[in-house]
Image (cartoon, rainbow, N blue to C red):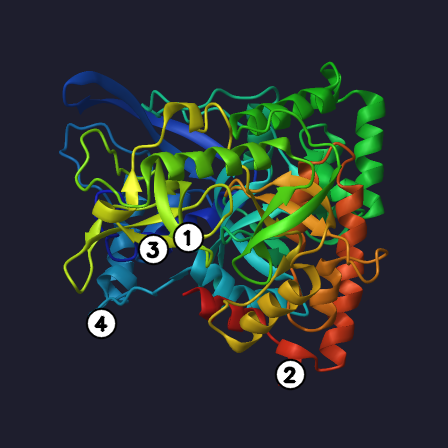
Amino acid sequence: SPRLGNEKTGKVDEPYAAECKQRLINLTIGKQCRVTIDYEREIPLGDRTPETRQFGTIGIGKREDVGAQLVSEGLAETQRHRDNDEKSSRYDELVAAEHRAKELKKNRHSDKEYTKTSINDLSDPRKAQAYAGSLISQSRPLKAIVDYVFNGSRYKLTIPSENCTIVFALEYLRCPQAGPPITSTRKDSKKAEPFGDESKRHAKLRIHQRTVEIIPHNVTKGGVITGQLFVGGGAARTDIGMELLGSGLARLDQIKVDYGEVPKHLLDAQTISQTSKKGIWSLEDPEAAARKQREARAAARGDAKPKELTVSDVTLSEIRDGSHFFFHTVGDASIAVMEESMKLFTKTHGTVAPGEQEGLDVRPGKIVAALFNDGAGKSWYRAKILGRPAKDAKGKNKVEVLFIDHGNVASVPVETHLRILDEALGTEKIPAIAKEAKLALISVRSIEEDDGYDAANFLQELCWGKELKATIYALNDDKQLVVSLASPENPKTTINVELVKEGLARRVKDFEVKQVGRQMSDGGNAVVKMAKELKVANDKARKGRMGMWRYGDVGDDDEEERKF
């Protein structure tokens, strides 16, 4: 039979290889068969030990020989043997079948040039997100073929009617991690979790290489289509997700359970499995183990424990845009200490840098003293180097710095505006006073755009120079505090909501809400509550054509274009 190619080595399929494979799948998968071993042969494997391989005949139903069927359709050819070689007991029938296929010019024996059908590969995240809408909008289930099983709930599928391949995952489900394939030589492969191999084996036996029906519901940021998958037909039609849950080989995503997104029939299936202590539920408190894993991952990010809700009195010290700012904590004694220390530093050293200084380290991340004029005159402040020095248009060697006790950024000449900071004033002794923060669960446009500028101006008008109540929820991946600010004019609402209500910001996607909620010790209840308030404000601004909504809906495509 024609050989399939190998994407990793760049080898392409031989003509009719894909058609031969699919025809064999249609003839055999899921059916009872008769196997007759005709002979054995030793196969050399290079440097490895030769392998003894069995050769035989497969019959299914009224078909005595599946191989003869493939040969008669011109999808395979008969292997030639010497007279004294062992051969199939049906060798003459195979030769006759090939002779008929050649006479009829079927497939491989055709005079026509072979053209391979091009399949659209949607395993790429961007392509998947672009095409997912056409799959999700289908009013009927889609027939698909399971090409590969990654684990119990994640597969690679081909959808013939849409001429595409996708990565598909069962919605709401999580299966234990399966071990690496037997052929894997990777040393960093993860070991199988309890019941991970059993879960994958169950899925392979039930759906691998079979035609199934899928109902796509969503697509993840990683380009994975999620939804339901059914196998079998008529009364035997089965939801594979329900089957995995009922066998204790999968569990529901606890975050989705907490947010009330999981359908009742799935919750009931898991409850029955838990009560019966099947599969993963036979282990000691698997939910506690999962919780420990989440805490371990949080610890690796530098956030060892779920955060308690913290409320502080703050004043803003720098505004970057409508949702990004730095603040000081009211009553922080280190503010006055640092102000006096830097005044003394300025008085001692003056405001003229000594030029080239031995020991001055201007590598990114280093803390130095930098000269800045705040309108009242030049003074030295603590600063962190943000980039590498570069010459400007006038030939001056400049570097960008962040003034860590205030939050503002400036590009300053290295020779005249930087000097070595006294060791007693380093961040090891007194940490940076200004804390960087983002308003929780909202996104604003760049300050270079009109709506972005208006958002920053709105934040400044409401908050600058005032004491504010800041509720701190979490720490994001950029090490910024995720906060809400109580409105000075109406303490019952927040600046976050006010910005959205004016159409100067929009509520973030649900998955971003969940990311913040995962870090909270209360399971994210406070975050969920604010997300609901923001949704109401978002809908009101959109209907009222406020701010960014004045020309109509701001779609996801619009936001993606701004990113790239």
What residue did someone put label 1 on? 409
Task: Tell me the CA gap for discs 4 and 2.
Answer: 54 Å
Q: CA gap, disc 4 to disc 3?
A: 18 Å
Q: In which quarter of the image is residue 274?
A: top right
Q: The residue tagged with tag 3: helix, strand or loop?
A: helix
Identify the element where label 2 is drawn: loop
Lateral position of residue 322 relative to residue 310, left or right: left
Residue bearing mark 3: 72
State the residue at coordinates (47%, 56%).
Answer: 376
Quote the CA–CA distance across marks 3 and 2.
Answer: 62 Å
Q: Which residue is drawn at 45% across and 31% down?
A: 35
Q: Are there few (<14), some (14-19), or many (20+) residues within 10 Å of tag 3?
A: many
The residue to which callout 2 is attached is: 552
**Residue 419, image x and y in percent?**
29, 38
Label 3 or label 2, whichever comes before in sequence order: 3
- Closest to the observer: 528 or 36? 528
User: Taking 180 as reference, is 245 left or right?
Assistant: right
The residue identified by callout 4 is 112
Give x and y (percent) for residue 356: 17, 39
Q: Nearer the viewer, mark 4 or mark 2?
A: 2
Is 66 placed above or below 33 here? Answer: below
Mark closer to the chain start, 1 or 4? 4
First in sequence, mark 1 or 2: give its number: 1
- Residue occupying the point 86% across, 56% down: 492
Residue 152 image position (x, y, % from top left): 58, 35
- The reply to whether discs 4 and 3 touch (Cβ–Cβ < 8 Å) is no
Q: Name which residue type carries label 2.
A: Gly
Q: SS at mark 1?
A: strand
